[in-house]
Image (cartoon, rainbow, N blue to C red):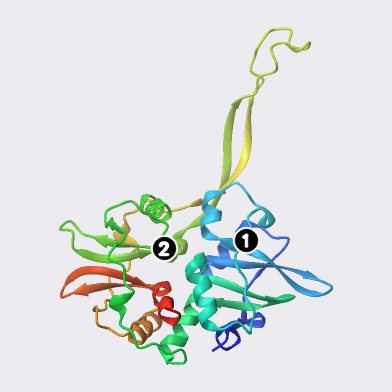
Amino acid sequence: MNVADAMTPRADVVTVELPGTRSDVLEYLQEQSFSSVPVVKSTDEGTEYRGLVSRDVLIEQPDEDQLVMLLEDVPTTTAETSLEDVARTMVEQGARRVPVVDGEFEGIVTVTDVIHAIATGDQETDDVVESYASEDVNTTYEGTPLIVAERELFYANVPYAVALDDEGTMSGVLTEVDIIDVARIVEGEEETGNNFPDQDADYSWEGIKGVGSRYLPTRDIEIPTGPVRDFMTSDIVTVTAKKSIQETAQAMISNDVEQIPMVTGEHLAGIVCDVDLLEALYE
């Protein structure tokens, strides 16, 4: 298969157009449950791709409103590229969404698109999931405040955490999509303190004196402070080590999840993420 066989064409891709604001992006991420959005610019020659804006950038730069300042440079591909090659790019460069660009913006191919091709058998692989699952599992306590858990995901550089209960037993899965769904933009004012004139200035005839407080408008993303258990998915989908790659891909698509805990009996033995399955296409 080529990228053209799996990608979402430009006509079906929801994009944000320059000039725009962070509010436009966050609204899209919440409605579509994606972690990033393509940004385009209309020109006389057509629709020009300019970059992606991700959820992480919005959180890390809360006071930046202009999209042009929030753009991230990510790898692109062409419609004629093989699915194996784009899968390798996704894994090696950590790119979940790869814009398809050939002069103009033609569409986008995602990790989920490749997983769908595996699930339907259009992209064949005969291996089992044990070979691609990781034994290193990112976890959190189900009572952890969501705002803290979000930072745990960020610093671990993974899009999920398996939640554990008071006995250390797996009780749910929290993903960055769960966090995006409940995040919201808040606006307000931030006091910057007294504004002091220069003590040595000619007009400073009474020495240093406060001339009033200044307030700057602020815009931030607010994440609820409730515990993880209130936002996680409790109905956990799991796989065993001998489950085939295709069956695991089918479970991901049918349950709309990007990672599945691997279990031995009732015990957590590892985690398999959708991007891990992509390695089966080119190894």
Classify mark 1: residues with Cα within 10 Å, few (<14), some (14-19) or many (20+): few
Per the image, the residue denoted by label 1 is 73
Point out residue 22 in the picture as x, y percentages from the top left corner.
62, 57
**What amino acid is found at the position of numbered circle 1 in the picture?**
Asp
Q: Which quarter shows the C terminus?
A: bottom left
Q: Residue furthest right?
A: 44
Using residue 62 as the reference point, say whether residue 262 is left or right of it.
left
Cα separation, mark 1 vs mark 2, equals 20 Å
> Which residue is depicted at the point 42% across and 92% down?
121
* Residue 277 position by quadrant: bottom left
User: In front: 211, or 244?
Assistant: 244
Q: Give the answer, above or below, for where 230 lies relative to 205.
A: below
Residue 159 shows which numbered tag?
Answer: 2
Q: Secondary structure at mark 1?
A: loop
Residue 153 visible in this rendered orientation of the protein: yes
User: In front: 46, or 126?
Assistant: 126
